[in-house]
Image (cartoon, grey):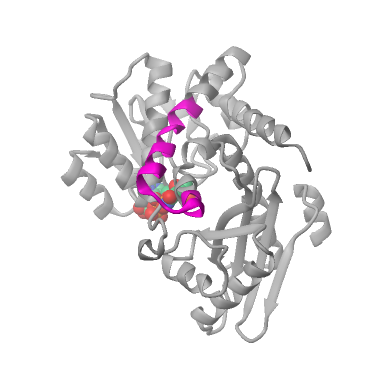
């Protein structure tokens, strides 16, 4: 499909591309919406089968960032960038410097950050070419690893769903099944364990599950049994599309609330969860803690301020659940409506 067709399919007016022969840079910056503020979103650096795939990834992800910032109440728009990983040898420092120059040329409409395939070190290199970068090292005024903040937000989101479904203010003794004990999953288990929750975990890497068993007394189950575990909350913290035609009929939980992006394989799976009486905490609302944390850098980073803002994810998730009940609609639709309401209140186009 041609680029202009893709732009019209995803509702974009513009797309920014940069090619730098000297470093092998082929980069795409997608800015979806700036009504609420400059577009902040991570930079992906992975292999793509072709240019179309890279462009679609940037367009899709940038739109997701618009909704995430809007539902969270941040003064930010939605953007994302993609650098197509060269298939031949390249100088990583030179490539990210060239990318930083490209971001700088956009004059602050787009602010970059870490994402799949990029690191804090890459953000430090970008910083030598532009100020429009977040997620830099703490010694340079940055916010460092976002994962503990994402996990804090997910824990607060879980508390809100538990309040809504079980009318409980605490999570002591609550049974949470966590899929994926990576950066966020590990910190989420730590948060939940500290508050007395009972954990069941599964990860493709047995060392990660064993660490959760050792440190938090988690029970380990085989990968294919996690979603059939009878529990109060299922927390998908691994890959996207975890909630699909194969998994949903087997769920034995009351709530799905986890960190993974794009948990619903298709929007209709959100409807399916509702019909089965399972409360779903929309992914982009519950996992916004990392975005809130990097955004705090823009006003002078302060970890305490950041934590205070992240804890408010509780209110967002509770509001989504309450509105969904009143409207008798699935939570993913209500989250989109709330984000769109905020965008339209901001006016512009
Ligand atoms: P990560 O790569 O550190 O962790 C993912 C973990 O899932 C790994 O331990 C991996 O072994 C495991 N895993 C992969 N496939 C699995 C499977 N089929 N079953 C069980 N475990 C499996 O990633 P992360 O940074 O912890 O992010 C987790 C999810 O949260 C991702 O979807 C990410 O996009 C999303 N997210 C992360 C952040 C953040 O701050 N890191 C913020 C927002 C959203």
Quadrant including the N terminus: bottom right
Above/below status of 296 relative to 317? below
Determine if the magenta segment contains residue 43: no
Q: Position of residue 98 (x, y in %)?
A: 60, 77
* Residue 227 visible somewhere in the drawing: no
Q: Main secondary structure of the magenta part?
A: helix
Q: Could you say which quadrant of the image residue 252 lies in?
A: top left
Q: Is residue 111 left or right of residue 19?
A: left
* Residue 223 visible somewhere in the drawing: yes
Residue at position x 35%, y 52% from top?
183
Magenta part of the chain: 295-317
Nearer to the camera, 44 or 237 = 44
Above/below status of 60 relative to 227? below
- Which residue is situated farthest in the front direction here? 300
Q: Position of residue 176 (x, y in %)?
A: 32, 31
Q: Could you say which quadrant of the image residue 112 lies in?
A: bottom right
Q: Is residue 83 left or right of residue 51?
A: left
Q: Position of residue 337 (x, y in %)?
A: 66, 28
Residue at position x 54%, y 37% from top?
72
């Amino acid at each position: 499909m041609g680029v202009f067709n893709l732009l019209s399919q995803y509702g974009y007016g513009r797309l920014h591309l940069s090619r730098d022969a000297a470093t092998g840079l082929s980069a795409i910056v997608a800015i979806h919406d700036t009504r609420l503020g400059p577009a902040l979103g991570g930079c992906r650096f992975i292999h793509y089968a072709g240019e179309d795939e890279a462009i679609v990834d940037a367009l899709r992800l940038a739109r997701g960032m618009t909704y995430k910032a809007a539902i969270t109440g941040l003064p930010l728009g939605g953007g994302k960038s993609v650098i197509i990983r060269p298939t031949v040898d390249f100088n990583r420092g030179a490539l990210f410097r060239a990318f930083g120059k490209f971001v700088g040329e956009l004059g602050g409409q787009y602010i970059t950050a870490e994402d799949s395939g990029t690191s804090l070190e890459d953000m430090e290199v970008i910083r030598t070419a532009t100020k429009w970068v977040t997620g830099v090292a703490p010694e340079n005024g940055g916010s460092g690893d976002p994962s503990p903040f994402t996990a804090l937000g997910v824990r607060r989101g879980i508390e809100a769903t538990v309040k809504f479904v079980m009318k409980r203010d605490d999570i002591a003794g609550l049974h949470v099944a966590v899929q994926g004990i990576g950066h966020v999953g590990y910190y989420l288990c730590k948060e939940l364990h500290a508050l007395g929750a009972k954990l069941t975990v599964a990860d493709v890497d047995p060392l990660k599950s064993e660490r959760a068993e050792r440190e938090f007394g988690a029970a380990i189950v085989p990968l294919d049994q996690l979603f059939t575990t009878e529990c109060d909350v299922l927390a998908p913290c691994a890959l996207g599309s975890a909630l699909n035609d194969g998994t949903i009929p087997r769920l034995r939980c009351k709530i799905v609330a986890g960190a993974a992006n794009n948990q619903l394989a298709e929007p209709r799976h959100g409807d399916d969860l509702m019909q089965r009486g399972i409360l779903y905490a929309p992914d982009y609302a519950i996992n916004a803690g990392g975005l809130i944390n990097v955004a705090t850098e823009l006003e002078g980073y302060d970890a305490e301020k950041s934590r205070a803002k992240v804890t408010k994810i509780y209110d967002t998730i509770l509001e989504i659940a309450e509105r969904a009940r009143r409207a008798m609609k699935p939570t993913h639709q209500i989250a989109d409506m709330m984000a769109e309401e905020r965008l339209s209140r901001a006016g512009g186009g």
